[in-house]
Amino acid sequence: MKRAAPLAPSDGLIALAFAAAYVALLLATAGDLGYARDEGFYFFAANRYGAWFQALLDAPRAALDPQSVDAAWSVNHEHPGLIKSLFALSNLVLQKRLGLFAMEGTSYRFPAMVLSGAGVALVVLWGTQARDRLAGASAAALFAMLPRYFYQAHLACFDAPIVTVWALCAYAYWRSLRDGGALWPVLTGVAFGLALDTKHNSWFLPIVCVAHAVGLELRDRIVARAIAAGAVPAACAAASPEPPAGARRAVTALAAMATIGPLVFYALWPWIWRDTLPRLREYASFHLNHEYYNMEFLGRNYWTPPMPRAYAPVMTAATVPVVTLCLFAAGLCAAARERLLYPLACAAALLAPAGGHRARSLSAARALAARLRPPAHDPGGTALLWFLAIAAMYGAWLSPSTPIFGGTKHWMTAYPFIALFAGAAFSAAVRRARVGLRALLLARRGSDARAGAAVRAAALARGPLVPALLGAAVVAAPTAETLHAHPWALSSYTPLVGGAPGAANLGLNRTFWGYTTGAVVAYLNEHVPPRGTVYIHDTAGQAWEMLLRDGRLRKDIRGVGTVAGADFALYHHEKHMLGQAYQAWVAFGTTSPDHIAGPDGVPVILVYRNRVR
């Protein structure tokens, strides 16, 4: 694969433009997106943290008293504090002091939006450095236009932020191997600490980095032994790059992760400032022994193990745009051919059996190695790192005990790397298309074409027309799918399974988290009587309260926790919650909802009206 020159200042501007455009798009589309259950819990926690930050400014000594710290930070202490702290500071400074947002809920969501934009920018930079500008830009566009990620990027939750911080740590580790020096290992340690204080997905980072370092060392040793044993032709041995100081650089980066990372984690999470080990054990135990929630998959409701091993690959195929998956597969195969076949040929030569067959085996291996040629020098082991980052996240779902209740969000940290492989494949396709276009133009001009015609054909092939047309063709479908899915992203599925209607027929989950209440606020505002009551079903109380504070719901509409006696009842469709619909039927004396909303005619949220009252 092509490797480009170091980053230019314009590359930073391109990345910044991608980030700014993405954040602007998220802000523009946040107004009709309801609040998820988890957001409601984090609003409450952020308010407690915000009060502590204010106390820290007003009376630092009192705020740092252990009892004061614990009183604030014990709230939602099953999750680290970094991202909730950003929610709190954004609300405290950007909203309450500066009044930047029309809706208060957006002030809590804004840090996650910014981090999501930063993640898109990081994909631009990494793709540009590892391959070329076209690969970086196309990878970023494909990553940004993933419907489920686009939804998560709006939320005051941790799932989109951990994608960015996880990729940032992997990128800093990659730069440590590629560039050496002291700066990037230190940044790797800092980024790892930030990831630890974001979400427990960070626990996979050391596994990926250690496996990557071991893989590079094995590759270098195999090739070196093959050269020393004469199992590789002399020309190939001469062309093989000198083995980099990869092991030493990897150990330096890993040492920084092991030392700096925990210090950053400790410093940024006041909850673990005392009783550190017991509280860390409690935190780890909560996630290692997490309770199981319900999730529908292929018509069956899963609540307890064994969970379906096919869940992650099937849901990825059903929710990631097909063109992105095809380009990813092409990029992965190209990288495997370039990076894996040569070391395998060297290993085959070393392992050739003794005796009469050895000469023929060795000759075949030498011929294969000569045909393949050594891959280009890549001290960062780029393709291997990208692959391991994907494999580690999907590997967890090979266990039948891994919960599936969170849907696609639990392996979203793999998505930047899927997009990077896809971007590399797109760049390679553009290069091939340019060669083919130039040959076609020259052939049409005839064999006696003048030199000027050849120059013009080459200029047209090299110009922006080819990447612009191919780029538009590739990005059009993901963009259309993503924007069409909003604000129903957890109900969205790709044409591969027939879209939302096909997925509903297949028995794939239609929604969870109770966020689709935001899609029926106009109906409720119009039809609920003054001081009327609404049974809010799966919507968290704090999420409902935020709709009121935003002004999206009338202030006099009251949310209640039971169907009996309510004027209206919401029902967010999930297989295991059908009983909630039955209760509304009995309480209201009707099986017919007064209002139905959902994408492409698929019922996702139903509103029942009590006409007896």
Image: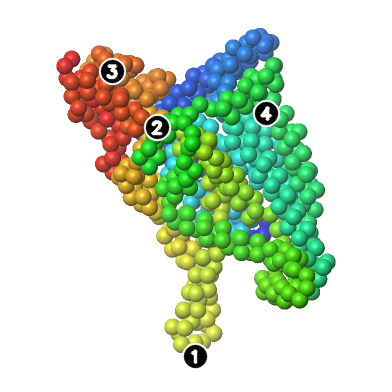
Instruction: Give the quarter of the figure containing the N terminus.
Output: bottom right
Image location of residue 579, percent across then percent down: 30, 25
Which residue is at the front of the view, 26 or 381? 381
Front label number (4 vs 3): 3
How far apart are the alpha carbons under marks 2 and 4?
31 Å
How far apart are the alpha carbons under marks 4 and 3?
44 Å
The reply, left or right, for residue 78 in relation to residue 557 is: right
How far apart are the alpha carbons under marks 1 and 3?
84 Å
First in sequence: mark 3 vs mark 2: 2
Front label number (4 vs 1): 4
Helix, strand, or loop for circle 2?
Answer: loop
- Which amino acid is tagged 1? Asp
Image location of residue 429, percent across then percent down: 51, 65
Using the rendered view, name the quadrant where residue 427 is placed: bottom right
Q: Residue furthest right?
A: 228
First in sequence: mark 4 vs mark 3: 4
Q: Which mark is residue 265?
A: 4
Q: Residue furthest left?
A: 612
Helix, strand, or loop for circle 3?
Answer: loop
